[in-house]
Amino acid sequence: MSSPRTPTTIRFTSGGADCQASHFAAVDDRLAGPAGRPVVVLAHGLGGTRDSGLEPFARAFAAAGLDALTFDYRGFGTSAGTPRHRVSLDAQLEDYRAAMRAAAALPGVDPDRLVLWGVSLAGGHVLRAAASRSDVAAVISVVPMVDGLAAGLHAIGSHQPAELLRATGRGIRGRVASRLGRAPVTMPIVARPGELGAMTLPGALEDYLSIAGPSWVNEIHADVTLELGTRKPAQAAADITAPLLVQIADFDLSAPPHASAKTAFKGRAEVRHYPGDHFDLFAGKPYHAAAVAHAVSFLTRHLGPGFETGRAGVPQPPVVEEASVHG
């Protein structure tokens, strides 16, 4: 098996900003159809950049015969855009859709065989991006954040009340400052328990730093605490016609597993469970190899040669293995 080549940098525009992406070309054409190869678009979670843990997944997909594209949202990493480090769920969804268009235009790619892959916050983005789309061939939602209210209630059980009140208060200050045109109010993306930050669970700082790339900055607009509670991308799952894989960490303290399971049921998804926490599917963690193997198997079964036309006209294999298996 050939090894994936060095990725190339491409650019696309979203919301008037110049966004940067990395293209990992497939090593061969084993999954190619008459119109070209399938391509996976990969996106990160809260404050994540494309150089922070996405490359091992992209390289695994490229080694399996799919092109892969990782990208930075506007205002993050090497992408342009201001304000910097502010999370807008609608803007990130717009960026993801722009990345889909860029992926569809890559040489040798079939524009009607897009694969959407998202982790954490982007695990919800891919559901919204895939809904009611005929050019999406498969979707993979990894430890997804799919219900803001459920996540808030989940946080109550794993954080000290003072931590939540402090972060929420800073978020309100940030929202007021934004509306008045004042300087942004920021806070760390991740911090130690008892400190100010968007993620302060035990071990979260160390886990995030273990995947952080050189373009990552531990800073985010504080109003993210209000932004996250306003969306429920789980509702889009029922409108996805492509095969859907949901990968759930059963002891996830950040993205509530029960909300992910409900979303998977609504989307008629294949489900894989891993007895770990939120970051445990990244490279260097206990369940990375299993998560990658399951994702590659899912895509090969649904996109490989010999498939039949199944659900909603989407290519599907004649036999599907058991849906729910621990790592």
Image: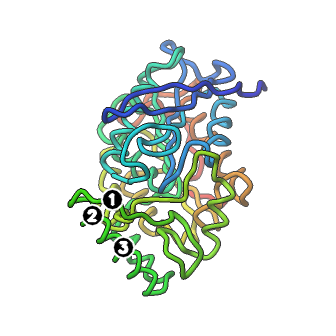
The residue depicted at 66 percent of the width and 53 percent of the height is: 211
Q: Amino acid at mark 3?
A: Arg
The residue depicted at 57 percent of the width and 26 percent of the height is: 9
Is there CB contact under 8 Å for labels 1 and 2? yes
- The residues bearing labels 1 and 3 have C-alpha atoms spaced at a distance of 13 Å
Task: Report which residue position mark 3 lands on.
Answer: 170
* Residue 165, image quadrant: bottom left
Task: Report which residue position mark 1 lands on.
Answer: 183
Is there CB contact under 8 Å for labels 2 and 3? no
Side of 283 where 265 appears, left or right? left
Q: Amino acid at mark 2?
A: Ala
Query: Mark 2 or 3, which is nearer the eye?
Result: 2
**Which one is in front, 320 or 260?**
260
Give percent across and percent down for residue 19: 44, 33
Task: Report which residue position mark 2 lands on.
Answer: 177
* Whether residue 59 is situated above or below residue 250 in the rendered picture: above
Q: Residue furthest top?
A: 34
Q: Label 3's element?
A: helix
Q: Residue furthest front?
A: 182
Q: Is residue 294 visible?
A: no
